[in-house]
Amino acid sequence: DSGVTQTPKHLITATGQRVTLRCSPRSGDLSVYWYQQSLDQGLQFLIQYYNGEERAKGNILERFSAQQFPDLHSELNLSSLELGDSALYFCASSAGDGALNTEAFFGQGTRLTVV
Amino acid sequence: AQSVTQLGSHVSVSEGALVLLRCNYSSSVPPYLFWYVQYPNQGLQLLLKYTSAATLVKGINGFEAEFKKSETSFHLTKPSAHMSDAAEYFCAVRAPAAGNKLTFGGGTRVLVKP
C-alpha cells in the first residue's frame, strides 16, 4: 500500500459528460501529480500541484482541469468526454515540490471508460 | 528536452534466467533515474532509484541497475527470474530542465515462462 488513495477505482460514463477523479496523497506529502496511462500514449504527465498551487503542466487538455485543496487532496476534472479519454488515470504524491532525488508514490488508479 | 527510451516493449524470459531491461536517457545534465514496476491492475511501485551516490543501485525483489554516464544508460537486471516478476517495468527520469517532473519511458512488459 503506497498510502495514496484514489477514488473511484472504476468509472463508466458517456461521451460529452463530466467526471471528477479524487486523490488523497500520502500523509505529509505536499505534491500531487496526475498521470494518464493509455495503450497508445503510455504514461503521460498531466499536471502537478504543490501545496495548493499549480507547479508544472504537461500534456493536459483544455477540457481537463485540476485543483489541490487546503487539506492537500486533489481532484482532476474531465469534461466533454470523448472516447479517446478512456484510460487509467494515476495520482502520485511526493514529499516537497518534486526535488530531484525524491520518488513519487502512486495510487492504484482510476480506470475511466467512456462509451 | 529530457526523454527516456526503453528498448523492447515486450521481453520473454524463462524462470531462473537473467532478466535484462534496457533504459537509455537523454539529458544535458546528470539526471535522477528511477525504475518502477506495475503489476496487473495495480499502480506503480518503486523498484529502485539512482541519485548519484553510487552507480550500482540495488532495489527490491532482487533487482539492481547500473548507471553508465558514458552510455547514458540505466539498465535493470535480475540474475534469476521468478514467475512473480511478470509485470510491466517503467524507467523514469527527473531533470531540472524539465521542471523536475517525472518522465516515463514506454514500458517493457515481462513474461516469465515456466
Image (cartoon, rainbow, N blue to C red):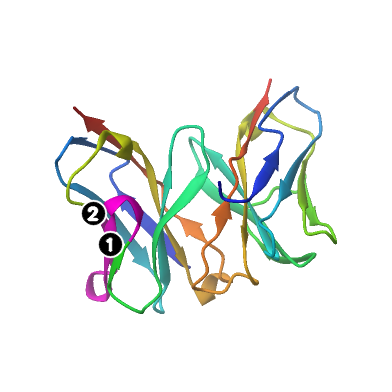
Does the stretch in magenta take in B74? yes
Q: Amino acid at mark 2?
A: Thr
Q: Look at 55% across and 46% down and name the residue there.
A: A1
The residue identified by callout 2 is: B77
Report the chain holding disc 2: B
As drawn, the residue found furthest toward the right would be: A70
Q: Which mark is residue B65?
A: 1
Closest to the observer: A27 or B49?
A: A27
Residue placed at 42% from the left, 73% from the top?
Answer: B31
Left or right, B63 with respect to B107, comes to left
| B113 left or right, relative to B24 | left
Locate the C terminus of chain A by quadrant: top right
Taking the spot 66% from the left edge, 56% from the top edge, the residue there is A26
Q: Closest to the observer: B94 or A97?
A: A97
Q: Position of residue B80 (x, y in %)?
A: 18, 45
What's the chain of the residue with tag 1?
A: B
Please say whether residue B73 is one of the residues in the magenta stretch.
yes
Assign a secondary structure to mark 1: strand
In the image, which residues are magenta?
A: B59-77
Circle 2 — which element?
Answer: strand
Amino acid type of the residue that numbered disc 1 sits on in the rendered structure: Ala
